[in-house]
Image: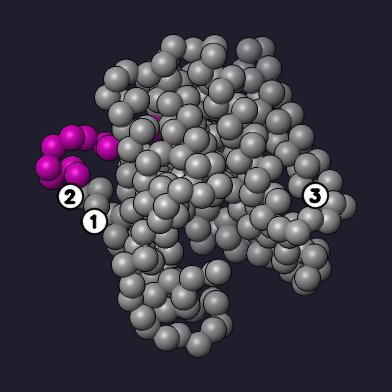
Amino acid sequence: MKRNIGLIKIWSLFIGFVALFLINFGIKTNIGYTSMMWLILDFCVLILSIIILIKNKFPMKNQVLISLVFGFLMFVAYQGISFSSIKGFLITFLSSLAMFSIFNLYEKNSLKLLKANDIKSILITIGIGIIVGVVLGGINLFISGKTLNFNIKISYFLVALSPGVYEEIALRAFIYSLCLYMLKGEINTRFQRFTCYFMMTIPHVMIHTPEQFVNQGVISGIMAMIILTILFGLPFAFLQRKRDITSAMIGHGLVDVIRFCFLGLPY
């Protein structure tokens, strides 16, 4: 019964998120539908992180320091102090704290920042992240259908810290930890595992697609969601679950570095 209550809570939150996703199409803003959806998910993660931290103990000191590092990397990614960098810092820092707090509570099914701390394991993590990043980065360029012009800049590596760190921590690992929290640390059934993978993937995918729905239609928007889920969402979720969070961060960051080097920044 407790399992069912946890699943009901998780899916109820997702239904609420879908409602916000649909409502967003009826609200015109200067920043556009996609940017607004990013803000909505950011706000949801921020509020849920604060609730978790109020209910639970803060994580250990070294985990607080790691969370601070993740947060401060957002100032590096945005190359200065701005609304985006401050927002990125707060969300990344607080969601990381909340994530560690939950993982300390339920160690059995927790995600590992690193699978192990020995040199060999760390090198394997880096290698896996690089291989996955290069493969998915190449696929991303292929399906873009755009003319490729290679140009490498330091700023591309800095900007890629945002998707690599913030998105993998706040929008994937934290959401998994939230599922784990609501399931009281138990992930035993197929539907529980499906739910965790679904929540680690779909909300993050959805916020990339509003403009696709508006400009290209419903079918195109749904197809974009399916492609993003299969090619990018699930591989990074799988890395986090089966290897560690760091490999997913490296892979995701590298995908964006490759995209920036051949297609330029999106702004």
Q: CA distance from mark 1 to mark 2?
A: 6 Å
Label 2 neighbour load within 10 Å: few <14, some 14-19, many 20+: few
Taking depth in this image into account, of 212 and 189 the one nearest to the observer is 212
Q: Is residue 139 visible?
A: no
Segment colored magenta? 111-123
Q: Which residue is mark 1?
A: 127
Taking depth in this image into account, of 159 and 194 the one nearest to the observer is 159
* Labels 2 & 3 near each other (Cβ < 8 A): no
* Labels 1 & 2 near each other (Cβ < 8 A): yes
Q: Is residue 182 visible?
A: yes
**Pointer 3 or 1: first along the chain:** 3
> Residue flagged by tag 1: what amino acid is it?
Gly
- Image coordinates of residue 139 in percent, x first then y, are 46, 72
- The total of numbered circles placed on residues is 3
| Of marks 2 and 3, the one in the foreground | 3
Label 3 neighbour load within 10 Å: few <14, some 14-19, many 20+: some
The secondary element bearing badge 3 is classed as: helix
Q: Which residue is mark 2?
A: 123
| Identity of the residue drawn at 50% across and 35% down | 90
- Image coordinates of residue 155 in percent, x first then y, are 37, 65
What secondary structure is the stretch in magenta mostly built from?
loop
| Identity of the residue drawn at 72% across and 66% down | 212
| Identity of the residue drawn at 73% across and 39% down | 17
| Magenta-drawn stretch contains 121 | yes
> Residue flagged by tag 2: what amino acid is it?
Leu
Q: CA distance from mark 3 to mark 1?
A: 40 Å
| Magenta-drawn stretch contains 92 | no
| Of marks 3 and 1, the one in the foreground | 3
Q: Which residue is mark 3?
A: 24
- Image coordinates of residue 249 in percent, x first then y, are 37, 49
| Identity of the residue drawn at 77% across and 72% down | 216
Q: Is residue 91 above or below residue 179?
A: below
